[in-house]
Amino acid sequence: MRILIIEDNSDIVANLYEYFEPLGHELDNARTGQGGLARVAEQRFDVIVLDGMLPGLDGLEVCRRLREEQQCNTPVLMLTARDTVHDKVKGLQAGADDYLVKPYSLIELEARLHALVRRASTLRTDQVLRFGDLEFDPGTFEARRAGQRVELTPFGYKMLVALLRAAPSLVTREELEQELWKDDPPLSDALRSHIHALRLAIDKSFPQSPPMLFTVSGVGYRLVDHNVSK
């Protein structure tokens, strides 16, 4: 599993690393809520362990932003010292998938994380999206071009799926912004930066192949299969 730990207590973080890394799991850590949101925007994780009492941006707000603003579907297990039913309900309402009260058993935590990842995998469709030599497999959450794996950010995956579903038709800027941010796009032209990163991943990383991602100035973006276009 690729596990993101959003926790500010260094002893807890060290304990989780000591337990999970020897078992073959890959861990990353953010010490603040904002840092956790940034990690999720940049990388894909199988599951997130979220402290409920982070300084500043607390766990409830982080979870809410993950679900509502970043449209992140990664399973979230919230760790907290708050153990009332009301607290648990608030965590689940914020978007957490499970709730574990401190102190906890590491064996139980591992079992719960495996269960969350297993449950999430059953919700994915097995239909592979393909256009030209570019494909995305929702079952494994892997993108490939010409058989080689393409590493993308969570936003990159979302844009690629939208483009593959529409290909070879155009996807407007507004449609992509809706896909990424729903009805609350950022004031800056963040979409341009995400498109640039996607182009680097699927085109610039494959100089032996013709580019596939094209910009229709002022309108949107589309994928082109040169083998068909000739």
Image (spheres, rainbow, N blue to C red):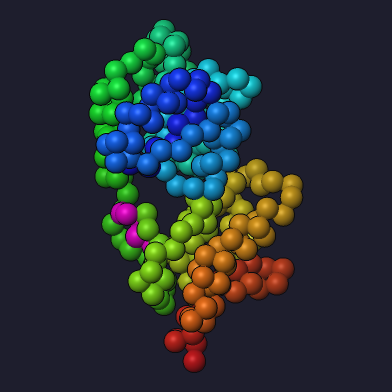
Residue 149 as seen in the image, left or right of residue 192: left
Q: Quadrant of residue 34?
A: top right
User: Is residue 73 placed above or below 125 in the rendered structure?
Assistant: above
Q: Quadrant of residue 76?
A: top left
User: How many numbered tags mark residues here?
Assistant: 0
User: Is residue 164 placed above or below 39 in the rendered structure?
Assistant: below
- Residues shaded magenta: 135-140
Residue 25 as seen in the image, left or right of residue 198: left
Query: Which residue corresponds to the image point at 41% horizontal and 38% vertical from the top-left?
Result: 27
Q: Residue furthest top?
A: 84
Query: Which quadrant: the N terminus?
Result: top left
118, 13: nearer the viewer: 13
17, 127: nearer the viewer: 17
Query: Which residue corresponds to the image point at 53% horizontal and 23% vertical from the top-left?
Result: 8
Residue 210 as seen in the image, left or right of residue 119: right
Whether residue 179 is in magenta: the answer is no
Query: Which residue corresponds to the image point at 60% horizontal and 20% vertical from the top-left?
Result: 55
How far across and down, in percent of the image, does residue 184 sit?
65, 43
How far across and down, in percent of the image, does residue 122 sit?
27, 45
Query: Which residue corresponds to the image point at 26% horizontal and 40% vertical from the top-left?
Result: 118
Q: Residue furthest right?
A: 187
129, 35: nearer the viewer: 35
* Residue 79 in view of the camera: yes
Whether residue 138 is in magenta: the answer is yes
How far across and down, in percent of the image, does residue 104 sit?
33, 16
